[in-house]
Image (cartoon, rainbow, N blue to C red):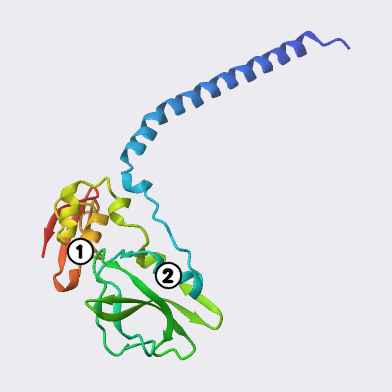
């Protein structure tokens, strides 16, 4: 079959146009990738070493698996947030009528046992309690619940099962010294402040570039302003 000259010219034009479009598309892709590369590198540089820390988890799902907490020390993630109660090791009962205190910032605990206890106000539910000793006395705090055959365990939200000093060994010595003294210093980030003085409550700030947190700090409140992820203003 013979192709007419005008049809042949149209086909040649269409092929040339397709090739031109493909070349332009490749050029655009190359330019976008070339332009995006520095931004990607900036984002990689912006990530702090903390972003690469993945603390080990227990993934406890019942009483037996939760008792793995008795095999190594644990550390409190957010101090002054969780209540503990007097515990009678003979009766295996917690005294929920009297609060003994609040777990402190980064407090190191040796869990002696994990038990089921009553749940005040919820007769159809039992609490999963971690039993420990402090100053020669027995205490327990809840970190889960059981209703019927179903457990809800939130140990991984409350406790580290690895020494935070090792997890964040790249922090400068002066930062760790401030944490041990339970002090927030300018230049510390929010995680370091939490390790020092416990959990913080976010407050409204007129400046969107700032984050203002109020730390109960065990009865000695602090208000800390963070800018660019670093503490810039600390006041009681």
Q: Residue 78 placed where, x, y %?
A: 29, 65
Q: Residue 220 placed where, x, y %?
A: 13, 70
Q: Are marks 1 and 2 in contact (CB under 8 Å)?
A: no
Q: Judge by depth and name the residue closer to the eye, 213 or 165.
A: 165
Q: Quadrant of residue 200?
A: bottom left
Disc 2 packing (10 Å; few <14; some 14–19; many ≥20): some
Query: Which quadrant is the N terminus positioned in?
Result: top right
Residue under label 2, please give it.
154
Instruction: Using residue 221 as the reference point, say whether residue 111 is left or right of it.
Output: right
Disc 1 packing (10 Å; few <14; some 14–19; many ≥20): many
Instruction: Using residue 216 as the reference point, say whether residue 236 is left or right of it.
Output: left
At x 27%, y 54%, the residue is: 165
Count of marks overlaid on the render: 2
Q: Residue 8 placed where, x, y %?
A: 76, 11
Residue under label 1, please give it.
197
Callout 2 secondary element: loop
Q: Judge by depth and name the residue closer to the eye, 217 or 138.
A: 138
Instruction: Using residue 215 as the reference point, say whether residue 148 is left or right of it.
Output: right
At x 29%, y 50%, the residue is: 168
Instruction: Using residue 174 as the reference point, say whether residue 118 is left or right of it.
Output: right
As drawn, the residue found furthest toward the right would be 1
- Mark 1 or mark 2: name the one nearer the start of the chain: 2
At x 29%, y 78%, the residue is: 83
Callout 1 secondary element: helix
């Amino acid at each position: 079959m013979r192709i007419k000259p005008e049809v042949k010219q149209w086909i040649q034009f269409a092929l040339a146009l397709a090739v031109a479009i493909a070349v332009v598309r490749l050029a655009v892709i190359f330019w976008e990738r070339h332009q995006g590369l520095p931004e990607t590198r900036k984002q990689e540089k912006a990530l702090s070493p903390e972003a690469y820390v993945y603390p080990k988890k227990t993934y406890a799902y019942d009483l037996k698996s939760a008792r793995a907490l008795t095999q190594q020390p644990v550390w409190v993630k957010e101090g002054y947030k969780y209540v503990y109660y007097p515990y009678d090791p003979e009766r295996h009962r917690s005294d929920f009528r009297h609060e003994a205190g609040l777990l402190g910032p980064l407090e190191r605990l040796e869990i002696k046992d994990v038990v089921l206890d009553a749940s005040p106000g919820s007769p159809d539910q039992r609490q999963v309690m971690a039993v420990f000793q402090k100053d020669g006395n027995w205490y327990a705090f809840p970190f889960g619940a059981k209703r019927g055959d179903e457990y809800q365990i939130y140990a991984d939200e409350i406790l580290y099962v690895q020494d935070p000093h090792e997890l964040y060994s790249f922090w400068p010595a002066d930062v760790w010294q401030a944490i041990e003294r339970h002090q927030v210093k300018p230049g510390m980030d929010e995680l370091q402040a939490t390790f020092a003085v416990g959990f913080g409550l976010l407050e409204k700030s007129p400046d969107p570039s700032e984050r203002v947190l109020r730390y109960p700090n065990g009865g000695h409140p602090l208000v800390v302003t963070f800018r660019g992820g670093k503490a810039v203003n600390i006041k009681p």
